[in-house]
Image (spheres, helix red, strand yellow):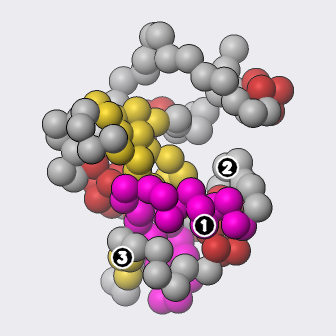
């Protein structure tokens, strides 16, 4: 694991182009930089992990602050995967959420990672994506 990690739990001073770049490098869906900024700024929790001044991980959680939360945009730079960064992000996002149901979209092939945190595959989950064709191609839907 890295020794000089910085964990940031707010959006102050974030370079949103770096967030978009991280999401692109991890083969996640990306949008205009302004949309990523809006999404993170409107989230209940955000996590940004830096190694030095390089963004190597991020994630966010939305909540109704009653009984439902949802995790989005968990990404760890390819070179930093397998070193506990993703686990750190998920743990930080889910702390103090024990009284809520939490859902998420796992990138196809990454389901086993989330199962380590008690997540199970939902049998009745339904989705309506803006780009259904892309979601089908990426394996998010049948």
Residue 53 belongs to the span the image colors magenta? yes
Residue 13 belongs to the span the image colors magenta? no
Single out the residue that lies furthest toward the top.
Answer: 124
Indicate the position of residue 135 as horizontal and vertical percent values: 73, 30
Which residue position holds label 3?
7
Element marked by disc 2: loop
Comparing marks 3 and 1, which lies closer to the viewer? 1
Which residue position holds label 1?
37
3D distance between C-alphas at marks 3 and 1: 18 Å
Q: Nearer the viewer, residue 106 or 70?
A: 70
Indicate the position of residue 75 as horizontal and vertical percent values: 54, 57
Label 1: few (<14), some (14–19) or many (≥20) C-alpha neighbours in 10 Å: some
The structure residue drawn at horizontal position 37% and vertical position 56%, both measured from the top left corner, is 44
Q: Nearer the viewer, residue 1 or 22?
A: 22
3D distance between C-alphas at marks 1 and 2: 16 Å
Indicate the position of residue 87 as horizontal and vertical percent values: 35, 54
The structure residue drawn at horizontal position 52% and vertical position 35%, both measured from the top left corner, is 105
108 vs 64: above or below: above
In the rendered structure, find residue 74 and report the number of the disc placed on it: none
Quarter of the picture holding the N terminus = bottom left
In the rendered structure, find residue 28 and report the number of the disc placed on it: 2
Comparing marks 1 and 2, which lies closer to the viewer? 1
Q: Earlier in the sequence, mark 1 or mark 2?
A: 2
Q: Quadrant of residue 25?
A: bottom right
Element marked by disc 1: helix
3D distance between C-alphas at marks 2 and 3: 21 Å
The structure residue drawn at horizontal position 37% and vertical position 86%, both measured from the top left corner, is 4
Q: Earlier in the sequence, mark 2 or mark 3?
A: 3
Q: Nearer the viewer, residue 129 or 89?
A: 129
What's the magenta region? Answer: 33-59
8 vs 65: above or below: below
The structure residue drawn at horizontal position 50% and vertical position 53%, both measured from the top left corner, is 74
């Amino acid at each position: 694991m890295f020794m000089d990690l910085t964990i940031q739990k707010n959006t102050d001073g974030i370079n949103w182009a770096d967030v978009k770049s991280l999401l692109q490098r991890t083969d996640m869906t990306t949008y205009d930089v302004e949309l990523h900024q809006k999404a993170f700024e409107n989230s209940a929790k955000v996590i940004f992990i830096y190694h030095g001044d390089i963004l190597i991980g991020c994630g966010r959680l939305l909540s109704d602050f009653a009984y439902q939360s949802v995790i989005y945009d968990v990404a760890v730079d390819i070179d930093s995967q397998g070193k506990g960064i993703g686990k750190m992000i998920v743990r930080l996002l889910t702390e103090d959420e024990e009284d809520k149901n939490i859902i998420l979209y796992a990138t196809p092939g990454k389901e086993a990672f989330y199962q380590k945190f008690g997540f199970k595959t939902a049998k009745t989950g339904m989705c309506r994506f803006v780009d259904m064709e892309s979601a089908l191609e990426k394996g998010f839907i049948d």
